[in-house]
Amino acid sequence: MGLTYAVYYDATNQHLFVGDGASRVLVFDLSTGVTDGMNASWVLGQPTFTSNTSTTTESGMKTVNGIAFDPVNNYLFVSDNANRRVLIYDHANSFFMNGQNAAYVLGQPNFVSSNFAITQNSLAGPAGLSYDPVHKWLFVADVNASRVMVYDLSAGLSNGMNASWVLGQTNFTSSAQPVSQSGLVSPYGVTYDPNHQRLFVSDNNMSRITVFDLSGGIINGMNASWVLGQPNFTTSPAPPPYFPTQNNFLDPVLMSYGASNDLLLVADSNNNRIMVFDLSGGITNNMNASWELGQPDFVHNTWWGATQNGMGTTEAVYYDTINQRVFVADSGDYRVLVFGSGGGSSSSSSSSSSSSSGGGGSSSSSSSSGGSSSGSSSGGSSSGSSSGGSSSGSSSGGPGACSSSNMICGTISAAENPTIQLANVPVELRDWHGTLLSTTKSDSSGGYSFGPTGLSTNNTYYVTPVVGRTESAVPLYNPVANLQSVGALVNPQIRGVPGTLQISGAPAGSYILISTASYTGSNAPTMNSRFSGSIGYYSAATGWDGAASVHAPTGTSYYLTCWVAQPAGPSVTYARMPASGSSGPYTVSPNTTVPLSCPTN
């Protein structure tokens, strides 16, 4: 699988559609369940599974940036961005043929054109798609023309047909980019809420989502009613450095709306996460997300690599409300993750782990493309619980031992060295749909326990260590499926429990840089995040006591570079020490402190 840009699940035919970077759409038949690394059943855009030719033809395509489906007429919509068109496939037979022809095209007059134009029947660069089967409206995010095109398909389809309405622009020939209540700068994703007739549009470069209330109909250039990700309709993203929060985005892309429980899921691409908004109580401007997937908390945006509970450059998400599954196009890791295993589907392959999606009553089981069975974590920690409802086991004696039946207990340890047991770690207990039930802290031996009061047998629970900015739980949610009367032993681990690099003896106001490789620059780097390329950076400034502390994950070597303050009257200059390169390397262990001082030239 190449870079994954789009994902959509057709619940009627149980087909998963994945748009990847090989100029194709892969179609997976999930009627018998999901297994890690399973084969696709059909391919569109290519004649075979091993070809990757980009073409402008009736059967070919270039870049797939959005997918939608009409469950009534069995039409599959595919946005072919580089060809500036939307292809429509007839899926009436409930199966496909490899490399089959599209039935219709929108945005171009025929299947061999890819002209750029900004008119009523053209598309400049379609991305996200959404379809409303009630009104028969097709929404197309035309990102290169700063608009959303709305096609009324109630009278049928024809090649190159006109759109009926436009959002983000006052007419079909303008492409202005105002940051306003009615304007759009780079609309990339669209998703429609049929319950309240609301259209959500991800304005990618503005790091916001504008929400249009269509209950009174559609008017060209109409105002949005709400905005997420920004405090108001006229605020642009702040300049770097960027820091993720519970209510912001960094380049949101495709989205999905769960009509059964009013959940909005947003692929927050450059924060490497999925944001989940509970809209059952309504929408307010700049409201907080309720849960997230891919990060241990709302203030992380780390790309951990291909792990079981991490993501990198999340391009798309789809919420299957029937089976309570979430499909995530994890583009940076060349895969699709599947959270949740409802509807009888199988997710029991070797790198799958169960975790809670935090909302909508669904459990969440992430399924990646290679690894071990679904009851264990990706960092070597056993959750001690079974995903099939059998007893997780119990223990007696020792830290974290279950002292009576019907309890959940265990020991918190460091993933890098499980013999290091972590005291005073906050631990949360949640029910099967993410509601917080109880909190505690691990004791001096790393032990914790919940119950027996308040716990019921045959219910599913999740144990969640509350981690800091430099840490991650492995996995984030530790499941106890169908708690048995004998209790359950759950031993969570935390990766990246920091050690401390402590600098002393430098003048107040000196700038300290800790890096994972020797730093060669003359000045301190401008950092958009903690990482630039493959080098990680941590920084601090010394206080009046001449000291500074940097908390850094263990398991790697660190280097020290100082810009030592040199007061000169009312101004301050800085001397780089050492004059070139960095001192080090230094290593840290969890919960230990390494004393350092700035080198001299």
Image: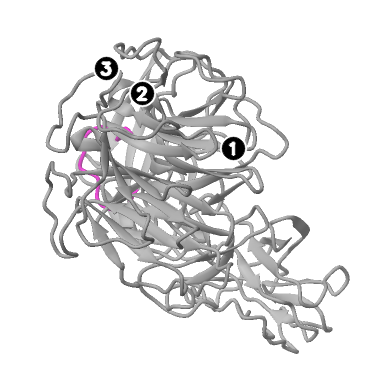
Of mark 1 and mark 3, the one earlier in the sequence is: 3
Q: Nearest the camera: 276 or 302?
A: 276
Residue 66 lies in what quarter of the image? Answer: top left
Question: Where is residue 186 shown, x and y percent of the image?
Answer: 35, 25
For residue 1, say whether it is visible.
no
- Please identify the quadrant where the N terminus is shown: bottom left
Q: Residue at x 24, y 50 (%)?
A: 518
523 drawn magenta: yes
Residue type of the residue flagged with mark 2: Ala
Mark 2 secondary-structure assignment: loop
Where is mark 3, residue-wise? 119
Cα separation, mark 1 vs mark 3, equals: 28 Å
Q: Residue at x 29, y 12 (%)?
A: 173
Callout in the foreground (2, 1):
2
Residue type of the residue flagged with mark 3: Thr
Residue 387 lies in what quarter of the image? Answer: bottom right
Residue type of the residue flagged with mark 1: Pro
What stretch of residues is rendered in magenta?
Answer: 515-526
Of mark 2 and mark 1, the one earlier in the sequence is: 2
Contact flag, marks 3 and 2 (Cβ < 8 Å): no
Q: Residue at x 37, y 27 (%)?
A: 205
Q: Is residue 479 left or right of residue 16?
A: right
- Give the total of numbered labels: 3
Q: Nearest the camera: 133 or 301?
A: 133
Where is mark 1, residue-wise? 194
